[in-house]
């Protein structure tokens, strides 16, 4: 498992514009996944709370 921060990959000295665009896309996907997890947990909590 690699443990490199996306910001480090973005700012590497020889990163091309395509490399940086790929890192931006990975960042956006990661943020989207976290947002969906939080949204899902929030909805499940509200449904649970209404059913009790």
Image (spheres, grey):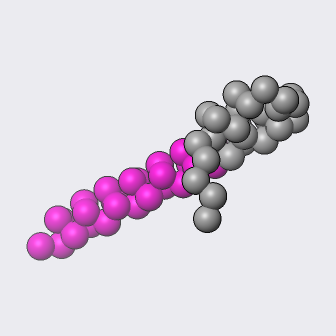
The residue at 78%/41% (across/down) is 22
Would residue 1 be found to the left or right of residue 39 on screen? right
Seen as rendered, the residue at the extreme bottom is 52
Q: Nearer the viewer, residue 6 or 46?
A: 6
* Residue 26 pos. (x, y %): 68, 46
Bounds of the magenta segment:
28-52
Q: Is residue 31 above or below residue 13?
A: below
How many numbered marks appear? 0
- The location of residue 9, given as percent across then percent down, is 70, 38
Spot occupied by residue 36 in the image (x, y as percentages of width and height): 48, 55
Residue 35 appears left or right of 52: right
Q: Quadrant of residue 14?
A: top right
Closer to the camera in the image, 8 or 31: 8
**Residue 41 colored magenta?**
yes
Give the residue at x 47% y 49%: 35
Res. 49 image quadrant: bottom left
**44 versus 29 height, above or below:** below
Q: Is residue 39 left or right of residue 48?
A: right
Furthest-left residue in view? 52
The answer to whether 37 appears left or right of 18 in the picture is left
Q: Quadrant of the N terminus?
A: bottom right
Name the chief secondary structure element in magenta: helix
Residue 8 screen position, x and y as percent: 64, 35
Q: Is residue 37 above or below residue 51?
A: above
Residue at 12%, 73% (x, y): give it. 52
């Amino acid at each position: 498992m690699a443990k490199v921060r996306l910001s480090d990959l973005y700012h590497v000295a020889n990163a091309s514009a395509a490399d940086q665009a790929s890192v931006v896309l990975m960042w956006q996907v990661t943020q989207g996944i976290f947002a969906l997890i939080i949204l899902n947990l929030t909805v499940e909590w509200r449904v649970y709370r209404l059913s009790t």
